[in-house]
């Protein structure tokens, strides 16, 4: 069974940093592209970042470029999102999602982890 | 960037109703259109990919159609478990994808 389990969310002050993790199991993690998608409270879905299966290709949404860094450790079956210079508008539930190769629609999602940026 | 719109933003329907949700892209996206269902407090679930392909395990009352800029998601006979918010997503500009604003389906 495919499982994606996020962790690392919490309350952080504006300007602070947080690192999210996503532990994958039930599939060959190193063969799949991965993404982070977020959802602000009561709002819709926003794609945040993409990383290729090898980690060699990375993309970011303009809203987080220069502040967030996506990475992965295929030996540990884990995906990460380092978030720096956090703003109130980054407050959201962050989901990791498995991308379908070459198409980047998301066939499996984690349960999400809540990040709250507030003083 | 490709912008996605959905209509209506919300609708009220009864069990057994036929429900249609429309999604429009700001430019042609061929058939690179996907649909998700999200229930409160839960992660989204993939329903339809490539405009009309049913994801494994999804009931056949869900169907998708369209190409180019205009797409529809149809639920042929609404069931109690179908009350949720539905999002379209374009993957034409993969991996930079965008979602529609969502359509909330609730009980009449």
Image (cartoon, rainbow, N blue to C red):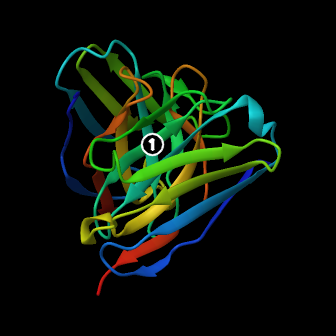
Q: Residue farthest to the bottom? A: A119
The chain that hosts pointer 1 is A
* Residues packed near mark 1 inside 10 Å, few (<14), some (14 to 19) or many (20 plus): many
Residue B3 location (% of width, % of height): 20, 33
Q: Establish if B10 lies above or below B77.
A: below
Quadrant containing the C terminus of chain A is bottom left
- In the picture provided, is A12 more to the left or to the right than A29? left
Residue B80, given in percent of the width and then of the height, sits at 48, 62
Tell me if residue A86 can be seen: yes
Q: Residue at x 43, y 72 (%)?
A: A115
Front one among B59 and A102: A102
Judged left or right of residue B102, residue B44 is: right
Name the side, left or right, on which A21 lies relative to A47: right
The structure residue drawn at horizontal position 28% and vertical position 68%, both measured from the top left corner, is A87
Q: Nearer the viewer, residue A63 or B24?
A: A63
Name the residue at 38% across, 67% down.
Answer: A92
Nearest the viewer among A84 and A113 is A84
Q: Element type at marker 1?
A: strand
Q: Is residue A78 above or below residue A34?
A: below
Q: Nearer the viewer, residue A109 or A10?
A: A10
A109 w.r.t. A18: above or below: above
Image position, residue B107 (x, y; %): 33, 65
Is there any visible trace of residue B76 in the rendered image?
Answer: no
- Percent position of residue A109, x then y: 59, 51
Which residue is at a point 33% across and 45% down the rendered structure image? A65
Q: Residue under label 1, please give it.
A: A49
Determine which quarter of the picture holds residue A90: bottom left
């Amino acid at each position: 069974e495919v499982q994606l389990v996020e962790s690392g969310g919490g309350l952080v002050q504006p300007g602070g940093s947080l690192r999210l993790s996503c532990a994958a199991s039930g599939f060959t993690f190193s063969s799949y592209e991965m993404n982070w998608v977020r959802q602000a409270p009561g709002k819709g879905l926003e794609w945040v970042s993409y990383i290729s299966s090898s980690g060699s290709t990375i993309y970011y949404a303009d809203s987080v470029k220069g502040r967030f860094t996506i990475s992965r450790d295929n030996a540990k079956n884990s995906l990460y999102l380092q978030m720096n210079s956090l703003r109130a508008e980054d407050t959201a539930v962050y989901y990791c999602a498995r991308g379908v190769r070459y198409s980047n629609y998301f066939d499996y999602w984690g349960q999400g982890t809540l990040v709250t940026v507030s003083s | 960037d490709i912008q996605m719109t959905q209509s209506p933003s919300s609708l009220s329907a009864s069990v057994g109703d036929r429900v249609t949700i429309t999604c429009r892209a700001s430019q042609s996206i061929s058939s690179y259109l996907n649909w998700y269902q999200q229930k409160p407090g839960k992660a989204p679930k993939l329903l339809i990919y490539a405009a009309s392909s049913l994801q494994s395990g999804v009931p056949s009352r869900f169907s998708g159609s369209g190409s180019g800029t205009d797409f529809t998601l149809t639920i042929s006979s609404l069931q109690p478990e179908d009350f949720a918010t539905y999002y379209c997503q374009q993957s034409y500009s993969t991996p930079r994808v965008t979602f529609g604003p969502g359509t909330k389906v609730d009980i009449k």
